[in-house]
């Protein structure tokens, strides 16, 4: 086994890294556009209730198991019980989780590559290099490959520097700049004509749209994806938290930042859509529904920016830069899952493990790009719709039933003496034992049957 494990140096570092993982492509355009087409503030409310009521407890399950074991997901889950069957199942779950995390990264890197390409395209346009900009915004294979590889190289570079020097240092730098850019952009867009219309759609609830069962399940799925649950990402970040820290508080902070940024992104994306509409850009499809999320980002927003002249191009650079940063702090957390396993279970050096695994994932992305029409949607569906909820159930069950009560109480008491008298201790164990698995099962059943 490799020597000393990494550890986050500070509370701030952990919160930035875990929030960096959680805040990603999902939050900045997934959530706002879902809210736009599903009842605005009503969807927001349902999302908030589910995120705090269910996703947060599930996040705690992963953080607690991770810190208890101070090991990668396979070893952590495998070590919770002396029973051979439970131990084997736990190990298997950890290994499936790392495969799923790798597959998520293989499609994420493709989309993140597009973000970088669009950012550079806006710079090219500013410089008058129209042909270059056209190549960058065209969805050709060469362009897709180049930017996927570039994004993977950035991810590999950061992860090979380790927990403190890589993950923590970069997340702590990138996250505040992301927050700052988001606020500045939102304020700017809110001053433009048409923005008020978008704000109305976002803030006036339409409950008839939000309270349908399908939508509640969609909002729950979005909350679990958004908090990076199920694949062992949060478990591994929990394993790098010092024993002195109060986990429920740290997990709560991460949840607040993740949801806060999604909500904030709503103040940018919805008004921007209606500013675009005001400027003659079509945002509705023929049937009156909003255009799909990828269309919105890759056609509506650039068209909007183009109608705004020079300031628009600058905003375009900043916006796609922001998306690239958000994607990068998530992708490093995905790559860390298989890398930690390779280091701890197979004795690989960090550098070697990162390059080998990162290379393998880039190869999978290449295969997806070569048969994009067939594979892209398939990988997204299998990983996010089926694998994440299923793995989430197992993780909650292991934290609730397999991790023994004393260890659990000890984890909760660290940094918080007297935790057993608190509300969290009274409610949370039942949540992860019964409520979380049951509700995730309902999501899973719905996606299989529906
Ligand atoms: N939470 C990330 C996002 O919203 C996605 C993610 C999923 C990250 C799983 C890590 C693991 O984009």
Image: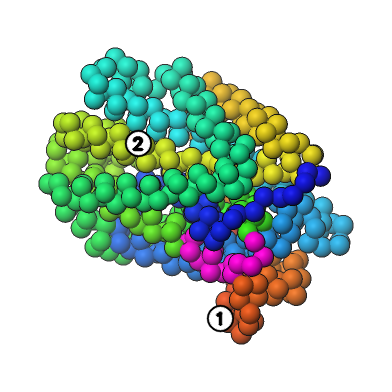
Residue at the (45%, 46%) spot, across then down = 173
**Residue 133 % position (x, y):** 30, 20
Q: Where on the picture, by quarter, is residue 278?
A: top left
The magenta stretch spans which residues? 242-255
Residue at the (71%, 63%) spot, across then down = 68
Residue at the (73%, 53%) spot, across then down = 71
- Write down the residue under mark 2: 320
Point out the residue furthest to the top here. Answer: 131
Q: Main secondary structure of the magenta part?
A: helix
Q: Describe the colour scheme in one phrase.
A: rainbow
- Write down the residue under mark 1: 423
Q: Is residue 59 above or below residue 34?
A: below
Specify the label residue 212 is tagged with.
Answer: none
**Residue 125 % position (x, y):** 25, 23
Q: Is residue 42 above or below residue 138?
A: below
Instruction: Decide if residue 254 is on the left or right side of residue 337.
Output: left
Q: Is residue 247 magenta?
A: yes
Residue 115 vs residue 347, the one in the foreground:
347
Disc 2 secondary structure class: helix
Residue at the (69%, 75%) spot, across then down = 409
Earlier sequence position, callout 1 versus callout 2: 2
């Amino acid at each position: 086994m490799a020597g000393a494990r990494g550890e986050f140096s500070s509370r701030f570092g952990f919160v930035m890294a875990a929030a960096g993982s959680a805040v990603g492509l999902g939050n900045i355009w997934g959530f706002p556009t879902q809210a736009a087409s599903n009842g605005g503030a009503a969807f927001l409310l349902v999302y908030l209730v589910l995120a705090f009521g269910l996703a947060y407890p599930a996040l705690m399950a992963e953080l607690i198991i991770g810190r208890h074991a101070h090991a990668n997901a396979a070893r952590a889950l495998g070590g919770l019980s002396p029973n051979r069957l439970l131990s084997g199942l736990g190990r298997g779950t950890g290994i499936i989780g790392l495969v799923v995390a790798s597959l998520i990264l293989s499609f994420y890197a493709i989309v993140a590559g597009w973000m970088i390409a669009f950012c550079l395209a806006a710079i090219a346009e500013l410089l008058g290099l129209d042909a270059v900009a056209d190549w960058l915004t065209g969805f050709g294979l060469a362009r897709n490959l180049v930017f996927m590889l570039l994004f993977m190289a950035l991810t590999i570079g950061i992860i090979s520097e380790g927990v403190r020097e890589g993950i923590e240092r970069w997340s702590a730098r990138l996250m505040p700049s992301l927050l700052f850019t988001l606020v500045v952009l939102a304020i700017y867009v809110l001053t433009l004509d048409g923005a008020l219309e978008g704000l109305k759609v976002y803030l006036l609830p339409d409950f008839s749209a939000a309270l349908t069962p399908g939508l509640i399940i969609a909002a729950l799925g979005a909350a679990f994806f958004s908090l990076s649950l199920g694949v062992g990402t949060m478990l591994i970040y929990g394993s790098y938290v010092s024993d002195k820290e109060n986990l429920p508080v740290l997990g709560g902070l991460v949840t607040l930042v993740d949801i806060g940024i999604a909500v904030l992104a709503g103040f940018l994306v919805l008004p921007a859509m209606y500013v675009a509409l005001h400027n003659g850009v079509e945002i509705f499809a023929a049937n009156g529904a909003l255009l799909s999320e990828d269309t919105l980002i890759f056609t509506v927003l650039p068209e909007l920016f183009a109608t705004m002249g020079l300031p628009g191009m600058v905003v375009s650079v900043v916006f796609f830069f922001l998306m690239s940063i958000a994607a990068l702090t998530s992708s490093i957390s995905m790559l860390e899952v298989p890398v930690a396993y390779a280091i701890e279970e197979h004795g690989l050096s960090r550098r070697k493990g990162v390059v080998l695994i990162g290379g393998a994932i880039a190869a999978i992305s290449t295969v997806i790009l070569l048969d994009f029409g067939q594979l892209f949607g398939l990988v997204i569906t299998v990983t996010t719709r089926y694998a994440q909820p299923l793995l989430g159930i197992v993780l909650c069950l292991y934290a609730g039933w397999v991790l023994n009560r004393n260890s659990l109480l000890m984890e909760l008491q660290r940094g918080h003496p007297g935790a057993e008298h608190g509300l969290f201790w009274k409610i949370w164990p039942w949540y992860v034992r019964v409520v979380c698995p049951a509700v995730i099962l309902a999501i899973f059943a719905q996606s299989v049957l529906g």
